Image (tube, grey):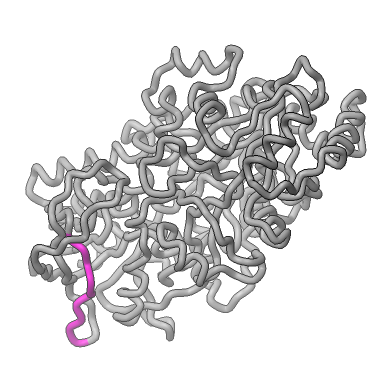
Amino acid sequence: MDADAVVVGAGLAGLVATAELADRGKRVVLVDQEGEQSLGGQAFWSFGGLFLVDSPEQRRMGIRDSLELATQDWMGSAQFDRDEDFWPRKWAEAYLHFAAGEKRSWLHEQGHRLFPVVGWAERGDGRADGHGNSVPRFHITWGTGPGIVEPFERRVRAAVASGLVTLAFRHRVDDLVLTGGAVTGVRGRVLATDPVDRGRPSSREEVGDFEISAQAVVVTSGGIGGDHELVRRAWPERLGTPPARMVAGVPAHVDGRMLGIAQQAGGNVINPDRMWHYTEGLRNWDPVWDNHGIRILPGPSSLWLDARGRRFPAPYFPGFDTLGTLGHIMRTGYDYSWFVLTQKIIEKEFALSGSEQNPDLTGKDVRQVLERARGGAPAPVDAFMRKGEDFVVARSLEELVRGMNALTGDALIDLESLRRTIVARDNEVDNDFTKDAQLTAVRGARNYRGDRLIRVASPHRLLDPKAGPLVAVRLNILTRKTLGGLETDLAGRVLRPGGEPLPGVYAAGEVAGFGGGGMHGYNSLEGTFLGGCLFSGRTAGQSVAAAL
């Protein structure tokens, strides 16, 4: 054997699995089709949000959380309803105990730290037992995505120095090697060295072959979000018509190849129609990869309109129900929508997802973070307002509508119809009580200290000149995560279609639906993708080490 284990994919799940194996004295070859500059995969680009339950940060913010409440929220969101949900449900239960238990202390021991204000993502569909977080649970990593990657990269590089781990970049796996019905290694092609920057398309020139034998293979290669045709083919009818135009939340090398390769070797892929894409995508004015999209992390106050300027019904408010809103958009006949808001709202409520869009948090710069409390939009948001193609800024509603129609070329927004919609909403602002469900939600959010301080603007009239100028933002569909994947048991072993393990192969991270072939079910509560990579990578690494 060339190694005790081969790990395929050097993203977060792969780094965690490799670190756990090396800590137990196992020899590991970590292979990835990209170069060393891409170590850490998509986690590097992330905002670094983590789902935790009953954390010290929550308690300090006055949030009363519990495993029981988190389980109610998770199961109400997952809506498990299939025979193949047996292992996904088991993984969800195990992950919830991890998030309410040792997850925080395990990370803390490795030097990981959290921003003190807990965010409230996916606020829900309005039902106590339905989709969404009943309380804030979105814990932001101090250092964002790179701060998540760093402890595991450090552990892996230490194992490289000690001779336990070999890093094999630009090695593209094309086959799992089968010997007597068991997976005994990988084979593929060596790609030409390419110094291209992280995230940018790299050369596919082949310069050689390779084959590595091992007692176990751990597949941690990610999902399909970089291949929009694969996304469209897997698109479920419940989310409407697949969008003709999307922006890419992940680079092109997130291509889903290993799903098919593992399936060809005998592994079972389940829930391929479950996916997680965002509705608030912006086309990046300074792209890292082709068709690069950035997601707005919105507060709840913006008026959300379809392509024709019709206001979305409850519960489709900003930050409440991602897939419910996605389905609503795709049933309108258009693949974009609009936020209409004010300068006052954008200053308080707009953040952008991604490590590169949050240089203060990523760089752990306290002074820069404190500057967010001052007037004006955050610098990355202001740059999009000035340079991004999806923004319209105007001093009057007439000017705003002209700009919206000019931007799309469709002339779908009627000035007087939009004015009536906004005036009706504005007439509800003057009282603390209202029949407008969105304003009720905004006032409810401001009862949470974290939202009132840094996340939710005080209610005001959109047409109040003092709150202006007016802003309209065209929102694109942004590809992101695969929620289904390789079916695995609680040891991370890949299963055959009949339910028995495929000997020698394990899976973790997005390629395994973050555990079991889809531990999220139909919906995410956010902060659970990085967490799923951490938990499933840790589980697979420990299981392989124990089995060898």
Q: Residue at x 50, y 22 (%)?
A: 379
Horizontally, residue 197 falls left or right of residue 342, namely: left
Q: Position of residue 204 (x, y in %)?
A: 21, 60
Q: Position of residue 181 (x, y in %)?
A: 24, 86
Find out whether residue 175 is within the magenta segment. Answer: yes
Q: Position of residue 264 (x, y in %)?
A: 32, 81
Q: Answer yes or no: is residue 478 visible.
A: yes
- Image quadrant holding the C terminus, namely bottom left
Horizontally, residue 63 falls left or right of residue 202, namely: right
Relative to 116, say whether 176 is above or below.
Answer: below
Image-quadrant location for residue 21: bottom left
Q: Which is the main secondary structure of the residues drawn in magenta?
A: strand
Q: Residue at x 14, y 45 (%)?
A: 159
Front residue (pair 147, 102) = 147
The residue stretch that appears in magenta:
171-180
Front residue (pair 356, 10) = 356
Q: Answer yes or no: is residue 47 visible.
A: no
Find out whether residue 335 is within the magenta segment. Answer: no
Q: Residue at x 10, y 69 (%)?
A: 209
Q: Residue at x 65, y 64 (%)?
A: 239
Report the label total: 0
